[in-house]
C-alpha cells in the first residue's frame, strides 16, 4: 500500500506520514484466510467477514441452524492465531461468575483471591450464546465494550487482541432466549454460514470424512502480528463524503417506517471501522463507498427491530437495509478538499509522500 501526507486540510488532521498494511502483514492475513478456508469449505465470503471483524477490533455473531459449521468456523479462526483461547458452552444453568470470574476466600492468606473466568482470553468462543438466560448474557456487556471486567469494585483489564466469537441458533428453535438489544448491539457483525453447495459438501466428505481438519490445524500468525494489522487498520483514511455516507445510512434506519428500533451511534462507529478493515484487506489504505455497502447488511441488520406490521408482511431487517442502500445517495467519485488542500479521489491511490 502507498503512503501520503494527511494534511490539516483533510478534516483538520495533523500532517503525518501514513503507512498502511505492508506486504509482510498482508501475507499474515493470507495465511490466516487460507488456514480457515481449509476447514470451512466453500464459504470464502464468510471467512473474509470474520477476518474483517477481527482486524476492526469487533466481535462476531454467527447465527444459523445446527450443523452448518458455526462452531467449527469460530474454532478454526481461533486456532489459526497463536493466542489464548477459551470456549464457553452457554447453557441455561450457566452463571455470570462462570464467565467473568469470582473472588474466593483464601484461608491461608486470610484474604480474597480473584479466580479469572473464561472471558480472560484473547479469543473467546461463546457456543450457543442464546441458550443462556439474559442475566448470564449480560455478563459479557462490560467486557465486550470496555475490554475489562469489574469484580467486587476492582477492575481487571482483558488481554489484547480481544475478540468474542459467538454462535447462536435461530430464536424459533426450542430452548433459546432472544439476545437483549444491548447484547446484539455489541457485536460488530452477524453472519450466517448457510448450507454448502453440492460441490463443497462433496469436498467436505473427503476432507472431514476421516479425521477432523481442526485436529491438525496449527497457528499461522502470532498475536503481535495481529496487533500490527489492527494498528494499520486504525490508520486507514476515510474521506469526508464517505463518513457522511455512513452517517446517512445509519440515520435512515432511525426514521424508516418498517423499523421500531434503528441503529445506534455504536453501529455508526462499527460500520466505519469495518469499512476500514475491508479496505486494508483489499490492499488499500483508503476506504471506498463499496467497502461500506459490502458490510452494511452484516453490521446493521441484527441491531434493527421491525415493527409488528413489517413482521406480518414478512419484512426482514436485511431487506430494509438493502432498501436503504438503494435509496441513499452514494458519494461521487471525487472528494473535493478545501481550497489550498491536497485534493484527492477516494477511488484512486493517494499521492506518494516525497
Image (cartoon, grey):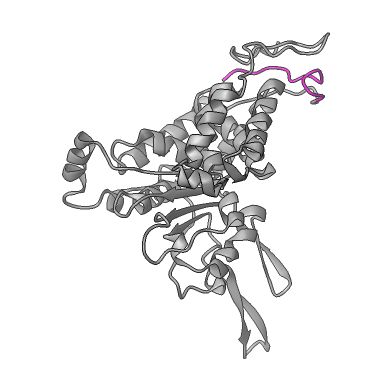
Viewer-proximal residue, 99 or 350? 99
> Does 214 sit left or right of 77 as displayed?
left
Residue at the extreme top: 340
Q: Position of residue 10 (x, y in %)?
A: 77, 20
User: Main SS of the magenta segment?
Assistant: loop
Residue 305 in the magenta stretch? The answer is no
Q: Position of residue 18 (x, y in %)?
A: 68, 24
Viewer-proximal residue, 16 or 173? 173
What's drawn in magenta, residue-wise? 1-12
Residue 2 at least partly seen: yes
Q: Position of residue 183 (x, y in %)?
A: 58, 56
Placement of 59 over or under 125, stated as above or below: above
Quarter of the picture containing the C terminus is top right
Placement of 42 over or under 98, stated as above or below: above
Q: Quadrant of residue 152?
A: bottom right
Quarter of the picture containing the N terminus is top right
Placement of 2 over or under 273, stated as above or below: above
Q: How many marks?
A: 0
Residue 235 at least partly seen: no
Q: Which residue is located at x 60 percent, y 33 percent?
A: 233
Residue 6 in the magenta stretch? The answer is yes
Q: Which residue is located at x 55 percent, y 66 percent?
A: 134
Q: Position of residue 69 (x, y in %)?
A: 32, 49
Placement of 241 over or under 49, stated as above or below: above
Q: Which residue is located at x 73 percent, y 17 percent?
A: 5
Viewer-proximal residue, 89 or 136? 136
Q: Which residue is located at x 51 percent, y 66 percent?
A: 118
Amino acid at each position: 500500500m502507498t503512503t501520503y501526507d494527511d494534511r490539516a486540510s483533510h478534516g483538520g488532521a495533523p500532517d503525518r506520514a501514513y503507512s498502511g498494511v505492508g506486504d509482510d502483514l498482508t501475507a499474515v492475513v493470507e495465511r490466516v484466510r487460507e488456514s480457515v478456508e481449509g476447514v470451512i469449505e466453500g464459504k470464502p465470503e464468510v471467512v473474509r467477514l470474520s477476518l474483517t471483524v477481527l482486524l476492526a477490533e469487533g466481535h462476531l455473531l454467527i447465527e444459523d441452524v445446527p450443523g452448518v459449521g458455526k462452531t467449527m468456523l469460530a474454532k478454526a479462526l481461533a486456532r489459526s492465531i497463536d493466542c489464548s483461547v477459551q470456549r464457553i458452552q452457554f447453557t441455561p444453568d450457566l452463571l455470570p461468575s462462570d464467565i467473568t470470574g469470582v473472588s474466593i476466600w483464601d484461608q491461608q492468606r486470610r484474604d480474597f483471591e480473584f479466580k479469572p473466568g473464561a472471558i480472560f482470553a484473547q479469543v473467546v468462543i461463546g457456543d450457543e450464546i442464546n441458550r443462556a438466560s439474559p442475566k448470564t448474557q449480560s455478563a459479557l456487556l462490560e467486557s465486550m465494550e470496555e475490554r475489562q471486567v469489574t469484580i467486587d469494585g476492582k477492575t481487571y483489564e482483558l488481554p489484547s487482541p480481544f475478540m468474542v466469537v459467538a454462535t447462536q441458533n435461530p430464536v424459533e428453535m426450542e430452548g433459546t432466549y432472544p439476545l437483549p438489544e444491548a447484547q446484539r448491539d455489541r457485536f460488530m457483525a452477524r453472519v450466517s454460514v448457510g448450507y454448502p453447495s453440492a460441490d463443497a459438501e462433496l469436498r467436505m466428505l473427503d476432507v472431514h470424512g476421516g479425521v477432523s481438519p481442526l485436529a491438525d490445524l496449527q497457528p499461522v500468525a502470532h498475536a503481535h502480528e495481529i496487533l500490527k494489522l489492527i494498528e494499520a487498520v486504525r490508520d486507514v483514511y476515510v474521506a469526508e463524503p464517505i463518513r457522511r455516507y455512513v452517517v446517512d445510512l445509519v440515520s435512515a434506519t432511525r426514521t424508516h417506517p418498517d423499523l421500531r428500533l434503528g441503529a445506534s451511534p455504536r453501529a455508526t462507529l462499527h460500520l466505519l471501522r469495518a469499512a476500514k478493515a475491508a479496505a486494508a484487506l483489499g490492499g488499500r489504505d483508503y476506504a471506498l463507498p463499496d467497502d461500506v455497502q459490502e458490510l452494511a447488511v452484516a453490521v446493521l441488520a441484527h441491531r434493527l427491530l421491525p415493527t409488528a406490521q413489517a413482521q406480518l408482511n414478512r419484512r426482514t431487517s436485511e431487506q430494509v437495509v438493502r432498501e436503504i442502500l438503494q435509496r441513499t445517495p452514494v458519494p461521487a467519485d471525487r472528494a473535493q478538499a478545501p481550497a489550498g488542500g491536497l485534493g484527492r479521489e477516494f477511488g484512486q491511490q493517494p499521492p506518494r509522500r516525497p
